[in-house]
Amino acid sequence: MTDAPAVRTRIIAIANQKGGVGKTTTAINLGTALAAIGRRVLLLDLDPQGNASTGLGIERASREKTSYDLVSGEATIAETAVATAIPNLDVIPSTVDLSGAEVELVDQPRRAYRLKEALGGLAEPPGYDYVLIDCPPSLGLLTLNAMVVAHSVLVPLQCEFFALEGLSLLMRTVEQVRASYNPSLEIQGVVLTMYDSRNLLSGQVAEDVRGYLGSKVYETVIPRNVRLSEAPSHGQPALVYDHRCAGSQAYIKLAGELLRREEPRAA
């Protein structure tokens, strides 16, 4: 196991306004891979569907304090974070109650900063090296809150025909957040997901995205893999369900690539 360097907590929002692009799968398995190599990770489930929580084995009946309580200011990180079966990986679970938060936030003062205020104590013990925020598939107030508190945005991008169109919209949103709320926000990287090497379209999309964003696109691509799809129904990350499958191996490589990008900041 690699010793984790002493770095300040890095907060990464995993976002894409499209559903079904592998966002939650990326949050779960990237978090697991980082935890496996010794990083302390908090996965904040900010999607009312709560799929990241389910995929980490957190039963709905046991979610007493959730991300809704955190965003609404009714609970702290310490009160909402629960340990998973993965050493070094905690999760703040979500329930459908969170879907009401956007409506409630509309008329609240500093509505874009509620999550930032809630996460303000991350430098205190127990502390985390990374906070991964699994955003909902929209660009509403919850995603805005995630981008306001985040240092960077990681974008899972499905290798499909309309990928660049959706990416352009997300990039504009990041620019708007940078201009109005969080000037240090950056694109951490773009991860190509559901890649099928037998499909010419996957290769063309990958080429187009790399031409558009260059080195911001990860070298690691996440393949279409049935084991990645099966794992959440067992309440396990794919890296636990079948660590030898192609999908798991890709997320291990992705974690290593992310660390190479992130941790020189500590030097």
Image (cartoon, helix red, strand yellow):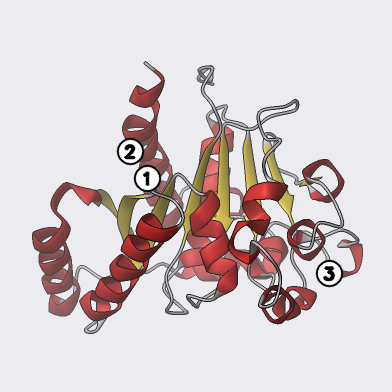
Which mark identifies residue 257?
2
Which mark identifies residue 111?
none
Image quarter (top left, top right, bottom left or bottom right) of the N terminus: top right
Instruction: Say which label, 3 or 2, has the lower sequence index.
Output: 3
Residue ID for mark 1: 254
Residue at image coords 71%, 35%? 121
Front position in the image: 159 or 164: 164
Residue at image coords 68%, 74%? 48
Residue at image coords 50%, 49%? 150
Residue 11, horizontal then vertical, whole percent: 52, 43
Residue 253, horizontal then vertical, whole percent: 36, 42
Q: Is residue 248 shown above or below 37?
A: below
Image quarter (top left, top right, bottom left or bottom right) of the C terminus: top left
- Identify the amino acid type marked 2: Glu
Confirm whether residue 242 shows in the render.
Answer: no
Provide the secondary structure element on which disc 3 rests: helix
Front position in the image: 59 or 265: 265
Q: Is residue 201 left or right of residue 119?
A: left
Q: Is residue 172 shown above or below 265?
A: below
Q: Disc 1 vs disc 2: Cβ atoms closer than 8 Å? A: yes
- Count how many numbered circles sit on residues in the image: 3
Residue at image coords 57%, 27%? 38
Q: Is residue 255 shown above or below 169?
A: above
Instruction: Say which label, 3 or 1, has the lower sequence index.
Output: 3
Residue ID for mark 3: 60
Residue 113, horizontal then vertical, whole percent: 61, 56
- Identify the amino acid type marked 3: Arg
CA separation in Å, label 3 and label 2: 33 Å
Q: In the current view of this chain or complex, which residue is farthest to the front?
A: 109
Q: Few, some or many C-alpha atoms within 10 Å of disc 1 (few <14, some 14-19, many ≥20)?
A: many
